[in-house]
Amino acid sequence: MRKSLAALDGISAIILDMDGVLYTGDRPIEGASRAVKWFRGRGKKLIFSTNNSASTRTEYVRKLAKMGISVRESEIVTSGYATAMYLRKRCPRAKIYVIGENGLRSELKQVGLKLVSQGEAEEATHVVAGLDRKINYSKIAGGLRALLAGAEFIATNADTTYPTEVGLSPGAGAMVGALAGCAGKEPSLVIGKPSPNILKIALRLLSARPRETAIIGDRIDTDVRAGKMTGLRTILVLSGACTKKEVQKVEDTEMAPDFVFKSIVEVVN
Amino acid sequence: MRKSLAALDGISAIILDMDGVLYTGDRPIEGASRAVKWFRGRGKKLIFSTNNSASTRTEYVRKLAKMGISVRESEIVTSGYATAMYLRKRCPRAKIYVIGENGLRSELKQVGLKLVSQGEAEEATHVVAGLDRKINYSKIAGGLRALLAGAEFIATNADTTYPTEVGLSPGAGAMVGALAGCAGKEPSLVIGKPSPNILKIALRLLSARPRETAIIGDRIDTDVRAGKMTGLRTILVLSGACTKKEVQKVEDTEMAPDFVFKSIVEVVN
């Protein structure tokens, strides 16, 4: 592993993945708060990013505050918020049929986008699918009607699972798969990692160029991959989903992260 | 179109698809009852088949009786019953986690197979997914846990949609897609058409060889396709999902049905 000084040399902006980097579920990772303060003390611009679309940015501000990490709402990018930003820019008049939770719905509404109900599904120009733990048949049927009527199919992300206290639970991939399985087509666009879309939106918010920006994440197949596709410096931490063995597997491949640390506090030590 | 006499020459057993051949939803197709009587009068062995797993065979006996079509339960093969027959033969000690409706659950139980609840999902040897109009997150999560623990993934069928009074509704493909989207793997086995498995089970029940058996169906992509894969004579009727145009498209291809009729009553006229 290389020295932390080198890891952040020439870096003015950092995109921090949250789950597995700053916390595991509701438990903060040791030193996370200190690391964030260190970045701030050195004037780094920060974005806190997650593929999860179920919570709002406000809820993440509160969650991080409880862990002693002080963050502004404008520094948080969920896949739900990134989807909202994407659609506001490209299709400000979109009529959106949503399969997703409050976090997603409220981010879409907050940027002024129009949501349509199940009864109006055929009028939708877009179907946006994200994690929805209250998924049911009539929600899927509404999405099907919208897609058959020609709506574009967008996924906030397609994570198969996410870790919970009781083990792995179905991620947004389940909702995306349900729609794809009845509409007979896959999403034309995925916003969250490993798609680079969410990182492009983060870069825009940071007003930063890729080569002066680093991503710190805990997954090779999403964080490192999306970082490389976007031209960022990639820093992997082993405090989350990824083991040393998995790092060894990608050594000397194009998926090898630029730097590897045990945890975020090592980046600043 | 060729003559009906030729269509049934040398045929002693007929597999009849139901929806689109004998009825549309709850409305019988004209002459269906007469055609079935004609087959019986000529001593043809019959199986009434459907990819739908939501209803039991008993319920189909009642449904057909209302339309003047007299059928024994032993003549009906739903994808749910075919799944039950398949598992009883191959894995009589299977412990099955089911995503599906009463028709599927009760067919599995009736052949003596053991179903496991959500709480015991990890103990399942098989996950069977079929149409479930009461699908919810915890059912999907149970299926995920079973699949992650190593259970085999079986689909009763993977129909994208099915026709209802209010248009197309999500078919079993939605449930299969939801599981595939979170477990990260597709079913290792599909029982219903276009897979030939359901027809092989029908042939066993008919005690008939493929070359003396005809399938009468309303879809090229399922009925004709599965029929050809099984070596049956294929008879397409245009009283259901398939249009003349679609028939013309497959003319002179290997998917061309052996015979085409407007409706089942024309087969016997």
Image: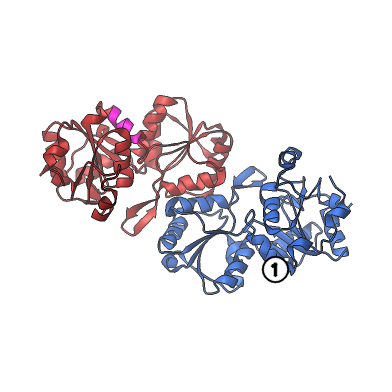
Chain colours: A red, B blue
Residue A49: which quarter of the image? Answer: top left
Magenta run includes residue A218: no
The percent coordinates of residue B247 (x first, y second) are 74, 42
Does residue B31 lie above or below B102 as drawn? above
Residue at 25 percent of width and 43 percent of height: A257
Total marks shown come to: 1
Is residue B223 visible in the rendered structure shown here?
A: yes
- The amino acid at mark 1 is Arg
Q: Quadrant of the N terminus of chain B?
A: top right
Q: Is residue B233 left or right of residue A63?
A: right
Q: Is residue A137 left or right of residue B269?
A: left
Secondary element at image label 1 = helix
The percent coordinates of residue B151 (x first, y second) are 46, 64
Q: In front: B2, or A73?
A: B2
Q: Which residue is mark 1?
A: B204
Q: Is residue B110 left or right of residue A70?
A: right
